[in-house]
């Protein structure tokens, strides 16, 4: 159940990024189609982050230390761009036109996902403490 909530949170964050960042395009007509596309792209983004991000962090550990973690913003942007490429290969109407759109989109997805995740984590903590 928690994984489904994380996918939905990422889908909402991607929806906000498509509305805010020029260069992130969702070119489908109906609302149901848009929601379905965002959920599938969120799933792709989750798989890309689960599989590739640990490898990149391990290989690029020195760059993370030298840049005080700021290279993570670039890595997240590249992973979002890779997710857009994979969505294109699956004929999904989701496209990111360049690195900077992916960079700013990844920042928005990260911040919105974190904010929405706070509510999820808050409910989990309140069940533990009985509040």
Image: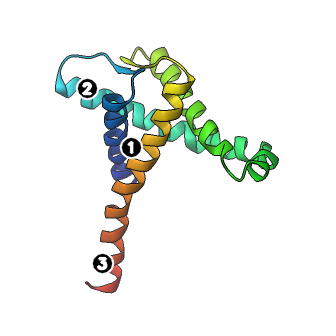
The quarter of the image holding the C terminus is: bottom left
x then y, percent, for residue 27? 30, 16
The quarter of the image holding the N terminus is: bottom left
Mark 3 neighbour density, 10 Å: few (under 14) some (14–19) many (20 or more): few
Query: As drawn, is 84 to the left or to the right of 75?
Result: left
Label located before the other in sequence (2 or 3): 2
Label 2 residue SS: helix
Q: Which mark is residue 127?
A: 3
Label 1 residue SS: helix
Label located before the other in sequence (1 or 3): 1
Res 88 seen here? yes
- Residue shown at the point (79%, 49%) measured from the top left: 66
Res 1 seen here? no
Question: Compared to 128, does 50 lie above or below?
Answer: above
Label located before the other in sequence (1 or 2): 1
Q: Disc 1 or disc 3, which is closer to the eye? A: 1
Instruction: Report the Cα–Cα distance between label 1 and label 3.
Output: 23 Å
Q: Which mark is residue 10?
A: 1
Mark 2 lies on residue: 34
Rendering quarter of residue 122: bottom left
x then y, percent, for residue 70? 66, 46
Mark 1 neighbour density, 10 Å: few (under 14) some (14–19) many (20 or more): many
x then y, percent, for residue 112? 38, 48
């Amino acid at each position: 159940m928690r994984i489904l909530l994380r996918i939905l949170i990422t889908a909402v964050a991607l929806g906000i990024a498509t509305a805010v960042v020029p260069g992130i395009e969702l070119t489908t007509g109906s609302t149901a189609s848009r929601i379905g596309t965002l959920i599938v792209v969120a799933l792709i983004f989750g798989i890309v982050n689960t599989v590739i991000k640990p490898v990149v962090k391990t290989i690029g550990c020195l760059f993370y230390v030298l840049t005080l973690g700021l290279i993570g913003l670039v890595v997240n942007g590249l992973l979002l761009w890779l997710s857009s490429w994979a969505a294109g290969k699956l004929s999904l109407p989701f496209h990111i036109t360049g690195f900077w759109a992916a960079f700013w989109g990844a920042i928005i997805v990260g911040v919105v996902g974190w904010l929405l995740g706070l509510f999820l984590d808050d409910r989990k903590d309140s069940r533990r403490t009985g509040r």
